[in-house]
Amino acid sequence: MIKMVNKLKFLPVLITCLVIFTIASIPFKIIESRYMPGDDALRHAAKAVSGKDWNQILVLRDDVKIDIHAGWHSVLGFVHKTLDFNAYQLVLFSVFILFLLFSLVPILLLERPEAWVFALLAISVADPLILKRLLLGRPYLVTMAAIAALGCLWPFLAGKRIRYANFIMLAVLTAIATWIHGGWYFFLLPIAAIFMARQWRAGLLAALATAAGVIAGASLTGHPVMFFAQTLKHVFLSFGNCKSQGMLVTEFQPFIGDFSIVIVVIFMLMWRALRGDWDRKTLDNPVAILALTSWALGFITKRVWLDIGLVAVLIWMASEFQEFFISRMPLLSWKRVLTTGALSAILFAATTNDAANRWSSSRPTCLTFAEDASWAPGRGGIVYSNSMEIFYGMFYKNPAAPWRYILGFEPGIMPPEDLEIYRKIQQKGEPSSFAPWVKKMRPEDRLIIVHLSDKAPKIEGLEWYDAGAYIWIGRLPVKG
């Protein structure tokens, strides 16, 4: 019997490798469908290739001084210079490496890594759009990975004996997330959830580890004091000067409850009760409290739910599945291998299929001015626009271009007078709303807008060019 057990000791490693292989294969297969994210992953890659500061790319407020994603741009810049990756390759690298990093944390910290496969499968079937957020190639996934680590490690922090390895791991992940993403304030809610669960020792140690990591990550930017000031200012600017929630960028708007995920959680609670394993600690624990709190705050802004609540739900589900697997399958069992293989195959098929062209249709609209270069902005010109999608696609395709954009990845960082013009365009949508920008335009400037018509916009004072895909380019009339 002892010999048989010794022979099976390799099975946990085999299962972990199988799970990691499955997770790594998912983005590769999706990318084969010509999938490309359409927002921030493009501008992060383009910035790394351009080598420019944001004030050379965007027309900014005077008080926007530093790059709050300096760490991520340093990573992408290193990959660009070392491997000679272009912007397209950097985007694909971002999609792959960040999805893998986010999943590696629970895979390596859970006792049964196959539970993570089951949790991802449950979420993906309930709401296929959730998986897409994990494949956007954006640095918030590093912060989500650190929150996942906190969700897995808090029980170890609650013990009487301090496990320094767990403490250091949490501090290091928090430091990396702070340096790369800049969203250090996201950690406040998970720590609060630990205290709300009355896990005082774990809460104190988690707070100390997180604080140490945040300070270290801020120090890596080279401007720690300014970093804290700028990241907080960015939050307030993102929500400011809006007369309605619909004027906010999509992920800052409130959600309507993500009902499909709620149903899955309810079914899981019923499943636990029906099998006779009900325990109040199922809900009375930091991860469950964090999930519920984030869900409630999602009615104010869905960003809390997407970046914090989603992680909490996944970790909670994985913990539930893990407890079931531990009670039903021995650690050293070929049944575990077969179960993991089946779950991995189903997860791969469920997430990578191109149903309704969900992956292949995700392609950004990019302007290259290949057909008529005369319609491109001139050297030192400014691109005025009513759509951030114009900036994402245009900057991605033209990272070295000698012009700047009035509207970039966040309206709040625009100069106040231009933000006021943009908000009026959002609110009214009338051609006359663009008049203040037209009045400021020079021959090298362009007004590039999304206009859902085959006829030129009725914005006076400009001549127009149809660039396709309902994108119109306006410029001052060329004399002579």
Image (cartoon, rainbow, N blue to C red):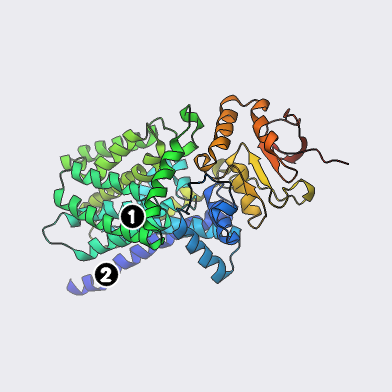
Residue 109 lies, in percent from the top left, at 28, 59
Foreground: disc 1 or disc 2:
1
Check the image and name the residue furthest to the left: 160
Task: Count the marks.
Answer: 2
Q: Which amino acid is tagged 2?
A: Leu
Residue nearest the viewer, comparing 460 with 466: 460
Q: Amino acid at mark 1?
A: Ala
One can see residue 61 in this view: yes
Q: Is residue 115 visible?
A: no
Q: 458 and 363: which one is in front?
A: 458
**Position of residue 47 measured from the top left corner of the image (x, y, whole percent):** 56, 57
Q: Residue 373: x, y in percent?
A: 78, 50
Give the quadrant of residue 335: bottom left
Rate crowding at label 2 as few (under 14), some (14 to 19) or many (20 or more) other CA atoms within 10 Å.
few
Residue at the spot x=64%, y=45% of the render?
365
Q: Are marks 1 and 2 in contact (CB under 8 Å)?
A: no
* Element at label 1: helix
- In the orientation shown, which residue stands out farthest toward the bottom? 3
Indicate the quadrant containing the N terminus: top left, top right, bottom left or bottom right.
bottom left
Q: Name the disc covering residue 248, or none.
A: none
State the SS at label 2.
loop
Q: Residue at x 40, y 58 (%)?
A: 223
> Which numbered disc flags the more N-terminal residue, 1 or 2?
2
Disc 1 marks which residue? 146
Q: Is residue 310 above or below residue 72?
A: above
In depth, the one of 359 and 390 nearer the eye is 390
Q: Is residue 52 left or right of residue 124?
A: right
Judged left or right of residue 457, residue 35 is left
Q: Which mark is residue 8?
A: 2
* x and y, in percent, of residue 382 in the image: 66, 45
